[in-house]
Image (tube, rainbow, N blue to C red):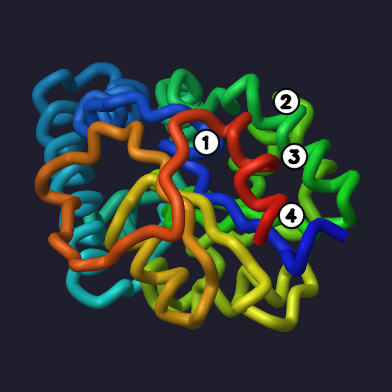
Amino acid sequence: MSGGIEAVVFDWGGTLTPWVTMDFAAGWRTYTEILHASEPDRAREVAELLAAADTGRWAAVKDGAKAFHLGEVLADAAIDTSSELHGKALEAYREFWVQATHTDPEAAPMLARLKERGIKLGVLSSTMWPGEWHEEWLRRDGVLDLFDGVTWSSDLEFTKPHPEAFHAALAAVGATDPTRCVYVGDRPYDDISGAKGIGMRAVLVPHSDIPVEQQVPVDVEPDAVIHRLAELPELIRAW
Ligand SMILES: [Mg+2]
């Protein structure tokens, strides 16, 4: 064992996976350009509806940590998901996002070092995408098997920073004492205040260019700040 640390749980976007600024509406256009291939105006109009639904759901996350999943965004925009083209269109949407899913190359060796010390490892992400998408990306990058448990808010009632999300992530890795657990994330409000709210230690990786509309001012100090994932094993050795 390393000191007293029982588990380390990581944020996904902007932490395990380096931040990439993406255009939500462009992502939805890849979907609607297949769904409405012969009607470009309709495709543009429906993409705007989807982007508005997506943004609206994220606003509810910001206001009350209300979790949601992709199916609810499609329903908000009145999309007929029984259409023959839906599957192919959704595949195009997912392909569009793949550029933002690549795991930091420092993650695997860092995780292996923590694992060697007997530390349990987890992921907790606020996401609308299905867990299987995330797990496929982690598997592609050779890190999925290093985790004891992965938790996606699309399966939960609440996102970060709600305490229930953090408790779910600790339960998923089999950790029992939050004070002996560390959370690593890139957002002061969602990640740092959420983790500290249940008594975890919190490490900030301040890399991400977080959209202004998603930022929440918060008066919280992380227990540490790191600039590379590779710094983590040494940092928490003394904890
Ligand atoms: Mg993040």
**Label 4 sits on residue:** 121
- Closer to the chain start, of discs 4 and 1, is 1
- Closer to the chain start, of discs 2 and 3, is 3
**Residue 108 position in % (x across, y down):** 74, 30
Q: Is residue 77 above or below residue 141?
A: below
The amino acid beneath tag 1 is Gly
- Element under disc 3: helix
The span from disc 3 to disc 4 (Cα, nearest Å) is 8 Å
The amino acid beneath tag 2 is Arg
**Label 1 sits on residue:** 87
- Disc 2 crowd, CA 10 A, few/some/many (<14, 14-19, 20+): few
For the residues bearing labels 3 and 4, Cβ distance under 8 angstroms: yes
Question: 10 or 69, which is in the foreground?
Answer: 10
**Residue visible at 16% across and 60% down?**
216
- Closer to the chain start, of discs 3 and 1, is 1
- The dot on residue 140 is 2
**Label 3 sits on residue:** 111
**Residue visible at 48% across and 81% down?**
198
Q: Is residue 228 left or right of residue 178?
A: left
Residue 88 visible, this angle: no
